[in-house]
Amino acid sequence: MAAINGHRAVENGNKSEDYNEKKERMIEKIQRRQEDRVADLKKRQEERQDRSSKSESVQFFISTFANEKSAIESRVKTVDGNGKTKPELISIFDGITLSVQKLQKYVTDSALFLTAHDLGRAQEEVTKLYVVVNDKREELIPKKKFAFKARKKETQQPNNNSKISGKIGASVKPSAPGKENRKEDDVVDVDGVIVNSTSRNGDLSLFSQFQCGIFNKTDEEIKLNGSEINGKDVGLTNLTSCTVQLYGTPSAIHMDRITNCTIFCGPVPGSVFVDNCKDSTLVLSCQQLRVHHTKDTKFYLHVTSRGIIEDTNKVQFAPYNWTYAEIENDYQRSELDQGRNSWDDIDDFNWLASDKRSPNWSLIPENERVTVWDN
């Protein structure tokens, strides 16, 4: 009997232990569920706060941008030349231009939380402001018209690599300043816009939308200085087998129908727009880059926001590496951040996959990059 009672006691003890273990496991399971619920609730709250913060930031940006833009436009409208000397007018417009540059910097600094659409729209508005300011400046402080003359090189068969040395790492030498042989009938000047003389009797509506530009050129080496392009909207249209150097800080650059060219530009506080470009090399520094309908083109790029491509393929990117005597002064004037460069962060509007990079663009291998550009 004692043995039986002892056996039953052991069984009861085992059952008690099993019950206690089950109870502990159940309590732990309930605790884990509660912890998971709390963690999930906290995560959702943080996500809502983050969305709210971003929404508030965007709304604050839109409001601030609109107010600053309106204030600049009002300042431009109220400027008149009555009783003011030329130095006084220059000082006034320099102050307005500085305000536009500060607004441009505000757009750049806000790029982290703005959508590509909002960023692009804001940048376009800033570019329009530059045009409005410079149009008013030209009206009240007219400059003597200039006519830039460029020499024509000997006719040769176009070569997709004619502007880049066949030896990787070798230098590419654009034309030296002031050494071109110039002809009086190469170009004519139309209100500050450089136009090929063959367009004299043609439709100038395209050219008139830019304050300065180079159009309809083949096999030429052309240079524009800061005194000619600073703060201006520059157009480069229908160029073939040309080398173009843009020294200074234009407010924006528009390129269209560029074939087998090498184009250099100093820091642009606004946007560079590239359309219908092929077989070319573009060495660019800007706040925003937008590329359309372009192929087989290399970009040596400094851009402070994310570059955008659309309907574009076989384009390659490397860091901007052009330099010239006044480039540091031009960077200070433009207020572009030299320490911030998104040259390898490109957004392809035709590529929707988020887990894989677009096949339409790539990086130039380091051993294939041009390392020196001779001035």
Image: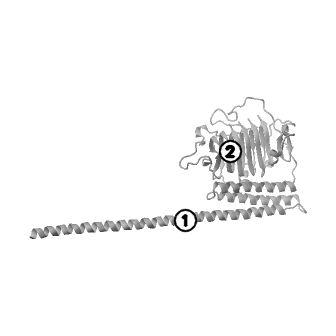
Q: Earlier in the sequence, mark 2 or mark 1?
A: 1
Image-based side of 79 in relation to 278, left or right: right
Mark linked to residue 36: none
> In this rendering, is residue 142 above or below 366?
below
Label 2 element class: strand
Q: How is the image coloured?
A: one colour
> In this rendering, is residue 105 above or below 201?
below
Label 1 element class: helix
In percent of width and height, residue 146 lies at 86, 45
Q: What is the quadrant of residue 220 in the picture? A: top right
Residue 50 visible in image: yes
In this view, the residue in front, 204 or 85, is: 204
Q: Quadrant of the N terminus?
A: bottom left
Please name the residue shown 84% across and 42% down the image. Answer: 203
**Residue that carries the numbered disc 1 in the rendered image:** 48
**Residue that carries the numbered disc 2 in the rendered image:** 292
